[in-house]
Image: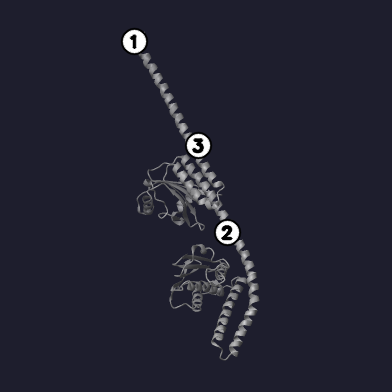
Amino acid sequence: MSISSELTKAINEIDQLNKKTNELQREINERKETEILLSHHLEFIKLISTISSDFIYIDSAEIDGAVNRALELVTRFTSVERGYVFLLTEDEKKIELTHEWCMENVLPHKGILESINVSDFEDFVNSLKGGESARVHAADIPRTPENKSMNDVLDLLEIKSFINLPIIISKKFIGYIGFDATKEQTEWSEEVVNAFSLTGEIIGNTLERKKAEESLRESEERLAHREKLAVLGQLAGGVSHELRNPLGAIKNAVYFLNMALEKPDPKVKESLEILEKEVVNSERIISTLLDFARSRPPRRQKIDINKILRDVLSGINVPGNIGVVDQAAESLPLIMADSIQLGQVFGNIILNAVQAMPQGGQLMIKSETREPGWVAVSIADTGVGIPKKNIGKIFEPLFTGKAKGIGLGMAITKTFVDGHGGTIEVNSKPGKGSTFTVKLPVLEE
C-alpha cells in the first residue's frame, strides 16, 4: 500500500473519530440541557408547592403578608424585579393595587400607579376578561401624544418589559397579576408564564376565600348586633316607662314648691333649680331611651336637607367662640326622607361637634351632590378628635367617650341613617378634629 493510500485512510479515520466525538459532545450537551431544564422544572414545582402550602391553613389575617411573600418568591425565581396584584373594585369601575413586592432599589407602583379607571382602558380590561395576557416591551410603544401618560409611567418605573395575566375565579374576572423587568427587555418563556399564571390563580382563590370569610364574619357581627339592639330596646322601653312616673311626680313637686314658697331661702331656691334642671336632663335621657326602643321605619316625604340643617342648627346653643361655616349647595335636590329622624341625626352629630370644642373652634356644615342619585352632608369640627381605638365603637349602643351621656345618641343616628338606605362615615385625628359624612339616596316619590 502506498504512502498516499495510508494517509487517506488515516484522514478518513480521523474524520470518523471527529464525527463521533462531535456526536458524543452534542449528546452530552443535550443531556446537560435536559438536566438543567429538569432541575429548573423541579425548582418550579417546588416553588408552586411552597406557595400553595403557605395558603392552605393560613388565617385570613395573615393572607396579605403571604400574598406578598408569594410575589417575592416568583419574582426572584423568574429573575424579574417587581411583582404585583391589581383587583377589581366592587363597583367594577376601577382596578386597584392591593399587593406588591419589589427588588431592592426598585421603585414600587405605590404612589405612582395605584389604580386605573376601567373606562380609560376598556380594550386592555376586556382583553384580560377574555383570558388573554398582556406582554409588552416599553421600546415597542410609540412616543406619540396619545401614549404620553403610559410612556411617562413606564419611564418613571423604569420598566423595560411587563406582563399582566388575568385572575379569573369561577369564570369571573377579579383582577390581574403582573411582573415587570426593569434591567433589560425580557422575553417570557412558557414555563415562566405558567409560573405567573399559577401564582395568580392561587392568590386569587386565597383572596376570594378571605373575602368570603370577612363577609361571613360581618354577617355574624350584624346578626349579633341586631340581637343586642333588640334586647337593649326592650330593656330601654321598660326602664323608660318605669322612670317617667316618679320623674313626673318630682317635677310636679318642684313646681308646687316654687309656687308655695314666696321668698324661699337662697339655698332652698338653688336646690330647687338644680332639681328642676336634673329632671329635664333625666327626661332627655328617657326620650333617648324611648327613641332607641321604638325605632320605626322612616315616614318618607319630600324634604329639603338644607332646611333641616338650618332648623337643627337654630335649635342648638352654639357658643360664641365657635365659628359656623355654612357650605350648603344651593341646587341640592329634594329627597324622600323622614324629617324628624334626619333632624335627630344631624342634631346628634352637630351637638357632639360643639361639645368636642370646649375651647372654641370651627364648625363646618357642607351639603352636596357627590354622585347622581345621592346627597351627602359633611359635619366637621376642629375639636379634640376621636382616638383611633374608639373609631370602630362610636356607633355601638352604650359606648360613650364623654363624662356625661349614656352612649345611645350615635347608635340611634346610625339606625336612622341605615333605615334610609344611607351610610355614615367618620374620619378623625386626635387633636385635629372629626368629620362625619352622611350619604342619603334621593329616591323618587
- Residue for badge 1: 3
View extreme (top): residue: 1
Tag count in the figure? 3
Q: Position of residue 296 (x, y in %)?
A: 61, 71
Q: Residue at x 56, y 46 (%)?
A: 56
Q: Is residue 340 visible?
A: yes
Residue reaching furthest to the bottom: 262
- What is the C-alpha distance between the residues marked 1 and 2? 98 Å
> Label 3 near label 2: C-beta < 8 Å?
no
Q: Is residue 236 or residue 301 the one in the foreground?
A: 236
Q: Quadrant of residue 32?
A: top left
Residue 366 picture location, percent across and down: 46, 71
Q: Which amino acid, by three-letter code, is at mark 1?
A: Ile
Query: Where residue 157 sits in the image (x, y, percent)?
Result: 38, 50
Camera-nearest residue between 290 and 4: 290
Q: Could you say which disc has been placed on residue 170 in the image? A: none
Q: Secondary structure at mark 3?
A: helix
SS state under label 1: helix
Q: Check disc 3: other Cα within 10 Å, few if <14, some if 14-19, many if 20+.
A: few
Q: Residue at x 50, y 56 (%)?
A: 89
Please indicate whether residue 129 sits to the left or right of residue 250 in the image: left
Whether residue 132 is visible, yes or no, is no
Locate residue 353, reporting x and y percent: 48, 72
Please state, as top left, top right, bottom left or bottom right, where the C terminus lies in the image: bottom right
User: What's under tag 3, amino acid-wise?
Assistant: Leu
Residue 218 is labelled as 2
What colour scheme was applied to this rendering of the protein? one colour
Left or right of 143 in this view: 28: right
C-alpha separation, residue under disc 2 versus residue under disc 3: 42 Å
**Does residue 145 appear to the left or right of 396 in the view shown?**
left
Residue position for label 3: 42
The answer to which of marks 1 and 2 sits earlier in the sequence is 1
